[in-house]
Amino acid sequence: MAHSKRALQAVLLSLSTLVLGACLSSGGDDPTNTAGGGSVINPAESTGRVFLIQPGPNATEEMVKAMVQLKPKDILRFDCGFFDLKTGIQITTTEDVIIEGCGMDETFLSFRESTSQEGFLASNVRGITVRNLTIGDSPGDAFKMKGVNHGTLKKVRAIWSSGRKLPEERPITAANFRDEIKVACTDPARHNPANPNPLETDNTSPDYTVSTASGRYGIYPVESRNILVEETESIGASDAGIYVGQTNIAKIRKSRAAFNVFGFEIENVQDGEYSENLAECNSGGFLVYDLDNLTQYGSRSRVYNNISRNNNTYNFAVPGSIVANVPRGSGLITLAYDKIDIYDNVFENNGTAGIILTSYDLLGENGDRRMDVYSEAVNIFDNTFKNNGNDLPQPDFASIIATQGGQISSAFPLVVGLKNALGGGGYRGAHIVWDGYTDSLNSSCDLPKDRNGNNVAVDADGKPIQGNQNPNPSCRYNKYKFETNGQRKVPAWWFSCINPNNNFGSDSLAFSNFHGTRGLDAVINLNTSDPTANLSL
């Protein structure tokens, strides 16, 4: 069926179907409107007091005095210059306040010697704007919002010194901060310098040196509502540069993330919109997914007009976390997340894949049976793909040793490469990689119960509205995906669409449907009679 871009903009999140072949088109509404029909409302400009903090030895004391006096409509303002602050900014249980500097290139708040984990923390606040400043070298997260309704982060930067706490560290100081905040992306370090592999020598970058000693999150709104992140930047986070999680109605736009493990991480978000962003020189560009055992599960997001390029920095997350499983060279990964439109983006020069559609089936059994472990209703259209999947990472022996063989990030590119090689496509990834896993009807599993023994609520599609407030059921309910005769409900729902109007560069494989580890017995066990060995599209 011919696809119309205008028709695709007629509803918020399109419902579509495809088994990586031909798809039926659907639509999305005007991208200028807020996803899910909600809105992000900025607090009104202040008519209250202004507390001005100036650089110098008394800056921390003056900041603390201002924080405890801050009332609705007040402004906490940092002057231009470099601030050496000994404790973090903490704003709690208030509303309609502004924290600002005189420019993200001119006001630098260093928390290198801070006793607080966060550089900035807002909790239980309704209406807060943080703008026009940079936070550097926070021990933990740089900007954190928790329990915030109507929060805005605009023209702010999170950064850690290049080579944080390593022998080659370049500390950011009052004398050099204006130069050190300008971090280019030309040549990321592809290989872990701790990896005992003499064949991998590309383990330094002229632009920036990543470090596990950097804080986990640069920009970090969580368990919040009506969040806007705009014209921001994050450099060097050891988990995610720009993150939003367990949040309803979130926009991230016109922002840049570089040299983080993940550039942009969207976790258990309902009604999200991510546009006009740049992810470069991270291990992975974008991650849109659901994590288990959290307060809510996500759905309904749009990722459009972004650039995800050269995300080939080796994964430097602390082994054991889920992001430590991400192979470097991933442009975008969606994992166990439903209803996502991915369109008008550019994915280029990502070594493993432009887009990876995967599920928890690949990662092993997920014990949270309240969560659907498959990515479905993923609609991919009007994107441009160039040079993806042509630089698969080798196994990371340092991570394998640290996790006693449990680091999936080492196995994933190997499996993809072997599958493509067996299928005649050579040892490489692709523009789009799909793990090939789907579920079948679990006819014996009934709708889960809440703590009172009643059926949990369901959405318009019949999917349970779940979270860790409900007991973990004994089985994973999925009848809402199927007709009474056991057939999957398509085309409207419960599968995904890769539209042929994507522009796939001929420099790479277009698709790789690798069906997990199935078919590799022929390689692993020398079982040359295995009939499932050739599974690559």
Image (tube, grey):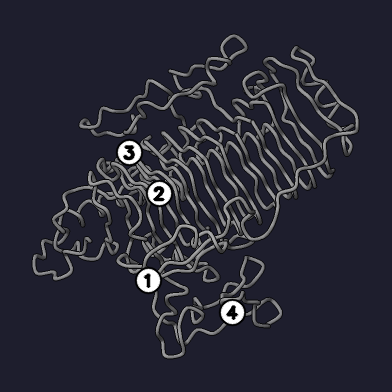
Viewer-side label of 4, 3: 3
Where residue 249 sits, quadrant-wise, is bottom right
Give the labeled residue for mark 3.
349
Where residue 210 sits, quadrant-wise, is top left
Whole-number angstrom distance, CA of label 2 to CA of label 3: 20 Å
Give the labeled residue for mark 1.
438
Location of the N terminus by quadrant is bottom left
Viewer-side label of 1, 3: 3
Q: Secondary structure at mark 2?
A: helix
| Nearer-N-terminus badge (2/3) | 2
Residue at screen point 43% across, 35% down: 280
* Residue type, label 4: Pro
Front residue of this view, candidates 45 and 153: 45
Whole-number angstrom distance, CA of label 1 to CA of label 3: 29 Å
Report x, y in % for residue 261.
Answer: 45, 39
| Nearer-N-terminus badge (4/2) | 2
Q: Secondary structure at mark 3?
A: loop
Give the labeled residue for mark 4.
448
Give the labeled residue for mark 2.
325
Report x, y in % for residue 19.
Answer: 33, 69
